[in-house]
Image (cartoon, grey):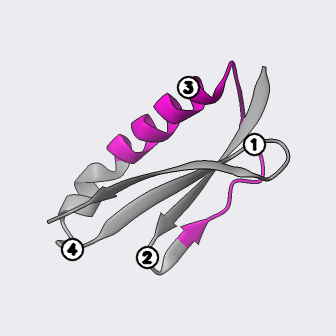
Amino acid sequence: MHRYFFDLDAGTWDAHDAIGVVLDDAGAAHAEAVQALRSCVLDLARSAGAVLAMNVRDETGRTLFRVSLAAQ
């Protein structure tokens, strides 16, 4: 089990995750990031051209991957 951190990037608004979530592996962290972005998609859809992204970090602070959605 590892702790993963999910930093939200919504253009001019950012949220840095200082607490994190303990998950089995990076695959579970990816699924968590996708679900979190899906929950924000209605707000994103109201702003055409907006991009919402989430950087996922591990316990060492290294960014593992970035998941993003864009409204068009």
Residue designated by label 4 = 49
Q: Amino acid at mark 1?
A: Asp
Compared across the picture, whether 49 is left or right of 15 comes to left
Residue designated by label 3 = 27
Classify residue 71 by image quadrant.
bottom left
Q: Nearer the viewer, mark 4 or mark 3?
A: 3
Residue designated by label 2 = 11
Is the residue 19 above or below the residue 23 in the image? Answer: below
Residue 31 in picture, x, y percent from top left: 47, 29
Q: Nearer the viewer, mark 2 or mark 3?
A: 3
Residue designated by label 1 = 58
User: SS class of the residue under badge 2?
Assistant: loop
Q: Amino acid at mark 4?
A: Gly
Compared across the picture, whether 3 is left or right of 64 comes to right
How far is mark 2 from mark 1, CA to CA? 23 Å
Earlier sequence position, callout 1 versus callout 3: 3
Q: Amino acid at mark 3?
A: Gly
Q: Amino acid at mark 2?
A: Gly
How far is mark 2 from mark 4, CA to CA? 11 Å
Earlier sequence position, callout 4 versus callout 1: 4
Magenta includes 32? yes
Magenta stretch bounds: 14-39
How far is mark 4 from mark 1, CA to CA? 30 Å
How far is mark 4 from mark 3, CA to CA? 28 Å
Compared across the picture, whether 18 is left or right of 53 comes to right
Residue 50's disc number: none
